[in-house]
């Protein structure tokens, strides 16, 4: 009695082929098993063309996915390299990221916020290193979106550790906001498939965390 050999008993499905070797090795193994199956098939119940076509289609799918994965990996690597080259040009430049540290230079403090909606009253409390409010700015009404402010720090003395707090209202309702701060790019690095920026005050952040380039 003849023995039927199943080509799929020794090859992987498309979801696992990448872990078991190259597509070329899988295809070669498949063809050898397919020939063995045809040589040992039951003469009274031979394989039909549809079955052979189906099996060939599956191995082609395995090979295609393997090649597609290799192509995508290559493109990702090239894209990351391009990003790193572009990111290098940012070293020394100012950027805007999430945070509430007050950036003070030459006696002027700078900060900002992103309002989720329109506000008829926006106030900014300037806090010293101990968290004590040293001044309050009344910015008035503002529309949804990103806004910035400046604060005269010339008479404040040591402003290291200064932060700010934004309060936005529409009537009696609170308008959600995100504090934004200015920082400086010190270096660029890559980690895995991510481009990261080393900021002078905020440390390491993903490239995508940058809200604006100043």
Image (spheres, rainbow, N blue to C red):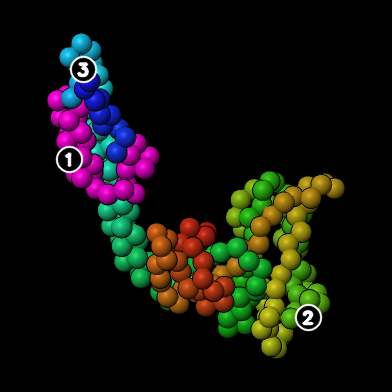
Picture coordinates of residue 169 (x, y %)? Answer: 78, 51
Main SS category, magenta section: helix
**Where 3 falls versus 180 (above or below)?**
above
Residue 211, image x, y percentages: 52, 59
Q: Which of marks 1 and 3 is nearer the N terminus?
A: 1
Q: Residue at x 78, y 47 (%)?
A: 170
Percent across and percent down for residue 99 are: 63, 66
Q: Is residue 93 magenta-colored? A: no
Q: How far apart are marks 2 and 3 (CA)?
A: 87 Å
- Circles 2 and 3, Cβ within 8 Å, touching? The answer is no
Separation of marks 2 and 1 at Cα, in angstroms: 71 Å
Residue tagged by mark 2? 130
* Label placed on residue 42: 3
User: What x and y, as percent, mark residue 20?
Assistant: 31, 48
Q: Give the range drawn in magenta.
A: 11-39
Task: Work out whether 22 lies above or below 61.
Answer: below
Callout 1–callout 3 Cβ contact below 8 Å:
no
Up-down relation of residue 92 to residue 86 (above or below):
below
Residue at 48%, 58% in the rendered image: 208
* Nearer to us in this view, 70 or 93: 70
Q: From the viewer's perspective, is the residue at label 2 or at label 1 nearer?
A: 1
Mark carried by residue 61: none
Question: Image quarter for residue 36?
Answer: top left
Q: State which mark lies toward you, 1 or 3.
A: 3
Instruction: Give me the residue at 68% from left, 80% from top.
Output: 161
Q: Callout 1: few (<14), some (14-19), or many (20+) C-alpha neighbours within 10 Å?
A: few
Query: Which residue lies under the disc numbered 1?
Result: 28
Q: Are marks 2 and 1 in contact (CB under 8 Å)?
A: no
- Total tally of numbered discs in the picture: 3
Query: Above or below — where is 73 with respect to 49?
Result: below
* Left or right: 212 as drawn, with respect to 104: left
The answer to whether residue 86 shows anywhere in this view is no
């Amino acid at each position: 009695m003849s023995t039927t050999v199943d080509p799929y008993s020794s090859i992987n499905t498309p979801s696992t082929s990448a872990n078991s070797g190259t597509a070329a090795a899988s295809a070669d193994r498949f063809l050898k098993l397919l020939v063995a199956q045809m040589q040992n098939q039951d003469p009274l119940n031979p394989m039909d063309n549809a079955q052979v076509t189906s099996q060939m289609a599956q191995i082609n799918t395995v090979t295609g996915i393997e090649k597609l994965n290799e192509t995508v990996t290559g493109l990702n690597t090239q894209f990351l390299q391009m990003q790193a080259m572009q990111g290098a040009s940012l070293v020394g430049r100012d950027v805007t990221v999430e945070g509430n540290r007050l950036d003070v230079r030459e006696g002027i403090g700078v900060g900002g916020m992103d309002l989720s909606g329109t506000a008829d009253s926006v106030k900014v409390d300037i806090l010293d290193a101990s968290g004590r409010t040293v001044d309050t700015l009344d910015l008035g009404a503002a529309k949804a979106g990103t806004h910035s402010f400046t604060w005269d720090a010339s008479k404040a003395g040591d402003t290291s550790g200064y932060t700010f707090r934004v309060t936005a209202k529409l009537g009696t309702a609170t308008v959600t906001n995100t504090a934004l701060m200015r920082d400086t790019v010190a270096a660029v690095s890559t980690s895995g498939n991510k481009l990261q920026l080393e900021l002078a005050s905020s440390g390491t952040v993903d490239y995508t965390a940058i809200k604006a380039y100043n």
